[in-house]
Image (cartoon, rainbow, N blue to C red):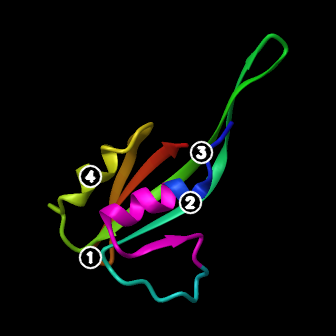
Amino acid sequence: MARPRSELSEALHSICPNVYFQPPASKKLTYPCIIYQLDGKDVMFANNGHYRLMDQYSVTYITRDPDDANINGILSLQYCSLTRTFSSDNLHHYAYRIYI
């Protein structure tokens, strides 16, 4: 069974104090920050039923510093992988996929 989102939120808050879950476009962000949202469900089947269910989250770390130590800190979380990086408006974005 999928773990509660609060566990992911606690882990992300231990890395960065500014964490936002699906913020509206009108929300003013404070950098560095982490934005995350539910992206899907990962289901494994066995014996004609659900064997394992995990929530899949898209997590984006946004910072002004391209050498920020938190970039690797997020990768230390279980079931996490870096999917892409890009820069926009002098902000560096690091996109991750996390399963909980």
- Residue drawn at 45 percent across, 36 percent down: 79
Report the mark closest to the observer, 1 or 3: 3
Q: Which quarter of the rendering shows the N terminus?
A: top right
Query: In the rendered structure, does residue 17 fall within the stretch colored magenta?
Result: yes
Q: Amino acid at mark 1?
A: Asn
Residue at numbered disc 3: 56
Front one among 82 and 2: 2
Quarter where residue 47 is shown: top right
- Of pointers 2 and 1, the one earlier in the residue sequence: 2
Q: Which residue is mark 4?
A: 73
The type of residue carrying mark 3 is: Gln
Label at residue 90: 1
* Residue drawn at point x = 35 percent, y = 74 percent: 17
Q: Are marks 4 and 3 in contact (CB under 8 Å)?
A: no
Lower position in the chain sequence, tag 3 or tag 2: 2
Q: Amino acid at mark 2?
A: Ser
Q: CA distance from mark 1 to mark 3?
A: 28 Å
Residue range of the region highlighted in magenta in the rendering: 8-23
Q: Can you say whether 99 is above or below 27 in the image?
A: above
List the residue tagged with mark 2.
6
